[in-house]
């Protein structure tokens, strides 16, 4: 699946110049701004392991994104973004030797991205696009273990790095108002542990 998506993105970026064309009422170049809302899904071995031993895990949350870009021609743009992926949690309870134990884990990630965007115009105002980029992300995680209601261990950690992301989507522009539906995958890693965040979002924006 990952290879298929990456191939689709590369195909869009490479093939876009061969389909260069413009349509009345659709800006060929210039700045644009937009905002998006969607659902982020967090994929990580640690969270999966907690789920496999009976923890209640919530690996999805509402995500928000702000983006700004510059369209050089009908087929090529650069785009900067800020995205907040939301919070991801796990919690569980167990009774061992007559003692009651509970544990809670939560994590959050946000970051600033920069991407190259290749667009294939299909019909007046409608196009499909692919993007390749990097995200400078910041993540925070914390965990608490309680025995009979008393905290016996707690920890907090944070991490940051720059990692790749890619996406595909569809866009429609009418009277300079832009609407999008897109899928993005963020491949993050820290200290040898891999994280994937899939983001499906709907956007609205304006082309100047």
Image: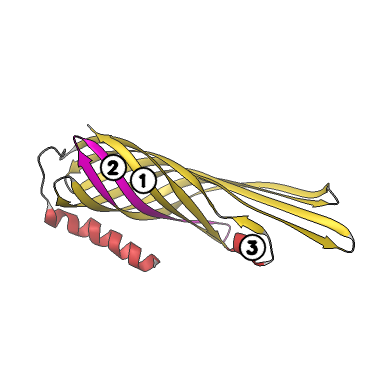
Residue 83 visible, this orientation: no
Q: Which mark is residue 179?
A: 2
Q: Quadrant of residue 192?
A: bottom right
Q: Which residue in the protein does label 3 denote?
A: 51
Sequence-wise, the earlier of marks 2 and 3 is 3
Q: Secondary structure at mark 2?
A: strand
Q: In the picture provided, is 12 more to the left or to the right than 191?
A: left
CB within 8 Å, label 2 to label 3: no
x 65%, y 57%: residue: 56
Would you identify the image quadrant in which residue 112 lies? Answer: top left
- Residue 202 is tagged as 1
191 inside magenta stretch: yes
Could you tell me which secondary element the residue under label 3 belongs to?
helix
Frontmost residue, 78 versus 127: 127
Residue 113: name its quadrant. Answer: top left
Query: Can residue 33 be spotted in the picture?
Result: yes
Residue found 21% across the figure and 50% down from its top: 127
Q: Residues within 10 Å of mark 1 (few under 14, many from 20)?
A: some
């Amino acid at each position: 699946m990952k290879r298929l998506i990456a191939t689709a993105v590369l195909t869009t970026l490479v093939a876009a110049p061969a389909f260069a064309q413009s349509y009345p009422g659709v800006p060929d170049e210039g700045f644009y701004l937009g905002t998006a809302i969607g659902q982020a899904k967090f994929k990580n071995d640690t969270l999966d392991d907690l789920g496999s031993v009976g923890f209640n895990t919530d690996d999805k949350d509402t995500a928000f994104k702000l983006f700004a870009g510059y369209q050089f021609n009908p087929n090529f743009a650069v785009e900067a973004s800020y995205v907040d992926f939301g919070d991801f949690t796990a919690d569980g309870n167990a009774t061992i030797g007559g003692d009651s134990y509970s544990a809670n884990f939560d994590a959050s990630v946000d970051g600033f991205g920069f991407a190259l965007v290749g667009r294939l115009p299909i019909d007046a105002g409608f196009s499909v696009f692919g993007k390749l980029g990097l995200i400078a992300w910041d993540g925070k995680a914390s965990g608490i273990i309680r025995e009979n209601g008393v905290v016996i261990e707690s920890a907090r950690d944070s991490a940051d790095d720059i990692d790749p992301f890619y996406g595909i989507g569809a866009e429609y522009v009418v009277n300079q108002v832009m609407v999008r539906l897109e899928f993005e995958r963020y491949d993050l890693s820290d200290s040898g542990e891999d994280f994937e965040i899939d983001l499906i979002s709907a956007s609205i924006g304006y082309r100047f």
